[in-house]
Amino acid sequence: EKGGFPSFMEKEINEQPAAVEQTLMGRTDPEGNLVLDELKIDEAVLRSVDKIVVVACGTAAYAGQVARYAIEHWCRIPTEVELAHEFRYRDPIVNERTLVVALSQSGETMDTLMAVRHAQEQGAKVVAICNTNGSTIPREADAALYTHAGPEIAVASTKAFLAQITAAYLLGLYLAQLRGNKYKDEIGQILTELEAMPAKIQQVIDAQAGVKELAQSMKDAASVLFLGRHVGFPVALEGALKLKEIAYIHAEGFAAGELKHGPIALIEEGQPVFVIVPSPRGRDSLHAKVVSNIQEIRARGAVTIVIAEEGDEAVADYANHVFRVPQSPVLLQPLLTTVPLQIFACELATAKGYDVDQPRNLAKSVTVE
Ligand code: F6R
């Protein structure tokens, strides 16, 4: 049942190339245009959308944060991401021109379902991005865009997360295509790049030399920090969540730019810090800024574990351990940079002797508010 893997979580991490591939499959026509037939919302309504609100919980909300960077860039539609349980009770400003996107692996998360109902009461259209066919959220939504990750059994989400990000990219590209905006030329190019991602994810999975030893060396860590910037920020949050959930270690993700506004005070000798480094080909010297963050924390004694692109030599001198990911367009990087963090959390929980599939106090699907 676990396909030869010691846990469902490991099996599902290894299924990620297929999860992304299946989520992309059959969604383009021979001319390379995106065709999302399931998106049964009037095109005129989709064209008139002036705000997108993504609602979700936990890992799905981090997928939403990644989606925001992509959707705003490609569509130029203001996009917010909100935890479903906060959205619902805040009297949010939502109307007929708002598109609400509900992200949920299970499709049964009560907090997310209540947010969907609330949005619909205000006249908003809701697109559900879900992994479970026929579940409640996609049934109640105005349209459903399914991720095809296959059943996810381990409580800690892995392949569903990558599939959610992939589906959200498709939605963003589709809206950009529909609205014919200036990023139109980029769409075909990004789609080609997306199609290359499953093989790159496989490369990351195959290249985890040293991760067992790293996990072993961090078995007694009391706290682990994660820093990221731009799309690396939600990846940092996700890396921290995985560690809390299955290894029961206090972990926190920060926007790297926040470091000097407070969190740097936490850095002392031996503090492990994961840093997700933006692509050197990205904008506004974000890469250089994060490299200088690594230098700052190293100078204060941090043990730095760096996730960086192949060929990025600037990080080598300041990293105690480097995980390499293949080059990809900046906005697609989370599909790669998340993977070493999942593998690390899984190895660390295993090293501590925990059941990675059934962490204490957690349920796979949270059907109460
Ligand atoms: C984290 C995790 C949870 C879920 C959250 C939402 O590994 O599994 O944070 O992501 O409970 O669940 P869904 O996506 O089913 O709505």
Image (cartoon, helix red, strand yellow):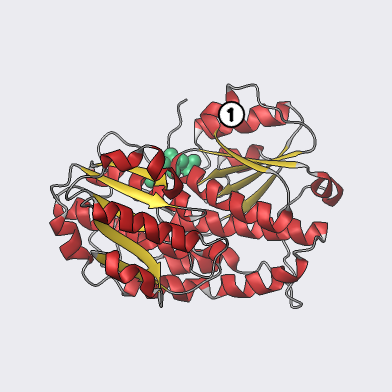
Residue 92 image position (x, y, % from top left): 66, 26
Q: Residue at x 63, y 33 (%)?
A: 116
Relative vertical location of residue 96 with respect to residue 337 in this rendering, above or below: above
Q: Nearer the viewer, residue 301 or 152?
A: 301
Query: Picture quarter containing residue 179?
Result: bottom right
Spot occupied by residue 206 in the image (x, y as percentages of width and height): 32, 74
Quarter of the render that holds ligand 1 = top left
Q: Residue furthest right?
A: 44
Q: Residues within 10 Å of mark 1 (few under 14, many from 20)?
A: many
Query: Is 345 placed above or below 363 here?
Result: below
**Which residue: 49% across, 35% down?**
109
Q: Residue at x 19, y 58 (%)?
A: 215
Expressed as whole percent of the image width and height from the top left, the position of residue 91 reads 65, 21
Quarter of the picture containing the N terminus is bottom left
Badge count:
1
Q: Residue 265 is drawn in which quadrant?
A: top left
Q: Secondary structure at mark 1?
A: helix
Residue 230 placement (x, y as % from top left): 52, 53
Q: Is residue 239 visible?
A: no
- Residue 219 appears left or right of 59: left
Report whether 216 appears left or right of 289: left
**Residue 129 in the image: above or below residue 261:** below
Asked whether mark 1 and ligand 1 are closer than 8 Å, the reply comes as no
Q: Quadrant of residue 319?
A: bottom left
User: In the rendered image, is residue 243 in sight?
Assistant: yes
The residue indicated by pointer 1 is 87
Residue at left offset 40%, top offset 65%: 15
Task: Tell me which amino acid carries mark 1.
Answer: Phe
Which one is nearer the viewer's eye here, 200 or 329?
329
Relative to 78, say whether 211 is above or below.
below
Residue 71 as seen in the image, left or right of residue 345: right
